[in-house]
Image (cartoon, rainbow, N blue to C red):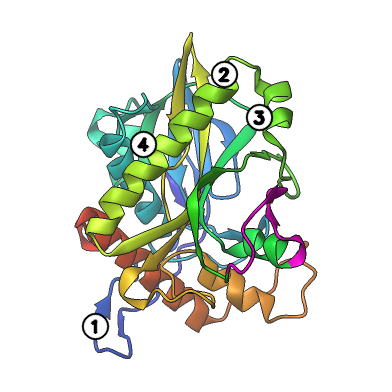
């Protein structure tokens, strides 16, 4: 039987607007007897299946590369379903690793565990990940804003004077980073990326990253959402480069409601930034062990994730729990 290591139930409750939010059981870790665990990352449990992988998105949440002790109800479902949506929307731009999220189509023993895997797992093509994260920034926020405020640059590139926090950039910028197994990712230059992945591949993944971001901007804009920045990952699948991991999710992107957008300050968001902002108020050095996330922060984070799922895909958590 599949073990749900943390199986805490938070009862449905009304928020301040009187809206009912679904608060399903929290899944922090999965263990599937007879299955080969390939890797347990910050958020995902990955099982190996011959030429494919089974990726299970848990409800774990990390911030500043540290995994919190508390899970966010429904988060894994949100990440999986939003990624599936974007894999479908961007398939014309680049191939990706998605095969199916239909548990009945999974091989044994996974197909026997629909209750826990439904909505939060996908069968994907196995690939060899590139050692870089492909970050695209369309607005001046987060670490980009901190760098600009300090030295007038973004990723060491000079920007026009007088920009404000959350200002829209003249054009989206590709700003790669390393992909650290442990600790913090480090920003690198494009030349550094060329040294890591090669002269032939670097311009290709840069162009694909910018094109996916632009497609995401167009689609999200129609739904009243600004995608301020995001990150992508790619891998080798045979002689093909494919999009892998997650795509344009609230873990990997900043989502700002257009109706509240106002440059010159931090923005209201529907993503992980809410957790980062809370942690920034604490006396914490951003290394393990993590501080405790209050119940209010956990609840509000789940609410934000569910809201962006509904806005982008038209789906709700009720379909999967």
Residue carrying label 1: 19
Q: Which residue is mark 3?
A: 131
The structure residue drawn at horizontal position 61% and vertical position 63%, both measured from the top left corner, is 142
* Residue 317 location (% of width, % of height): 26, 61
Residue, x 45% and y 71% (percent of image)?
301
The answer to which of 311 and 79 lies nearer the viewer is 311
Q: Are marks 1 and 4 in contact (CB under 8 Å)?
A: no
Nearer-the-camera pick, 195 or 39: 195
Q: Is residue 321 left or right of residue 123?
A: left
- Mark before the other along the chain sequence, 2 or 1: 1
Q: Label 3: few (<14), some or many (≥20) within 10 Å?
A: some
Q: Is residue 242 magenta?
A: no
Mark 4 or mark 2, which has the lower sequence index? 4
The x, y position of residue 212, in whole percent, is 39, 38
Q: Is residue 67 left or right of residue 273?
A: right
Q: Residues within 10 Å of mark 4 (few under 14, many from 20)?
A: many
Any magenta on residue 152? yes
Magenta residues (range): 150-163
Is residue 35 visible in the rendered image? The answer is no
Mark sitting earlier along the chain (4/3): 4
Q: Residues within 10 Å of mark 1 (few under 14, many from 20)?
A: few
Tag of residue 122: 4
Distance in Å between CA atoms under marks 1 and 4: 30 Å
Which residue was labeled with disc 2? 201
Q: Secondary structure at mark 2?
A: helix
96 vs 251, left or right, is left
Expressed as whole percent of the image width and height from the top left, the position of residue 140 reads: 56, 61
């Amino acid at each position: 039987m599949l073990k749900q290591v943390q199986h805490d139930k938070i009862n449905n409750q009304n928020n301040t607007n009187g809206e009912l939010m679904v608060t399903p059981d929290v899944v922090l870790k999965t263990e599937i007897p007879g299955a080969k665990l390939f890797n347990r990352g910050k958020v995902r449990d990955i099982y190996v299946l011959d030429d494919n992988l089974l990726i299970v998105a848990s409800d774990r949440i990390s911030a500043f590369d540290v995994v919190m002790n508390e899970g966010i109800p429904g988060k894994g479902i949100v990440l999986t379903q939003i990624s599936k949506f974007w894999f479908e929307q961007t398939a014309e731009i680049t191939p990706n690793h998605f095969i199916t999220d239909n548990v009945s189509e999974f091989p044994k023993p996974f197909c026997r565990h629909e209750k826990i895997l439904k909505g939060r797992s996908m069968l994907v093509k196995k690939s060899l990940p590139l050692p870089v994260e492909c970050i695209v920034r369309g607005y001046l926020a987060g670490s980009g804003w901190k760098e600009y405020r300090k030295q007038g640059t973004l990723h060491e590139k000079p920007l026009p004077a007088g920009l404000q926090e959350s200002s829209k950039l003249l054009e989206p910028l590709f700003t790669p980073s390393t992909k650290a197994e442990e600790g913090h990712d480090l920003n690198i230059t494009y030349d550094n990326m060329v040294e890591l992945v090669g002269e032939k591949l670097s311009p290709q993944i840069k162009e694909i990253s910018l094109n996916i971001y632009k497609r995401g901007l167009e689609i999200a804009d129609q739904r009243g959402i600004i995608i301020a920045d995001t990150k992508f990952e790619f891998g080798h699948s045979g002689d093909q480069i494919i999009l892998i991991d997650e795509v344009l999710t609230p873990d990997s992107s900043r989502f700002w409601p257009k109706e509240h957008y106002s440059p010159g300050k931090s923005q209201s968001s529907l993503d992980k930034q809410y957790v980062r902002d809370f942690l920034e108020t604490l006396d914490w050095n951003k290394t393990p062990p993590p501080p405790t996330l209050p119940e209010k922060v956990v609840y509000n984070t789940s609410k934000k994730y569910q809201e962006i799922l509904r806005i982008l895909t038209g789906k709700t958590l009720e379909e999967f729990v």
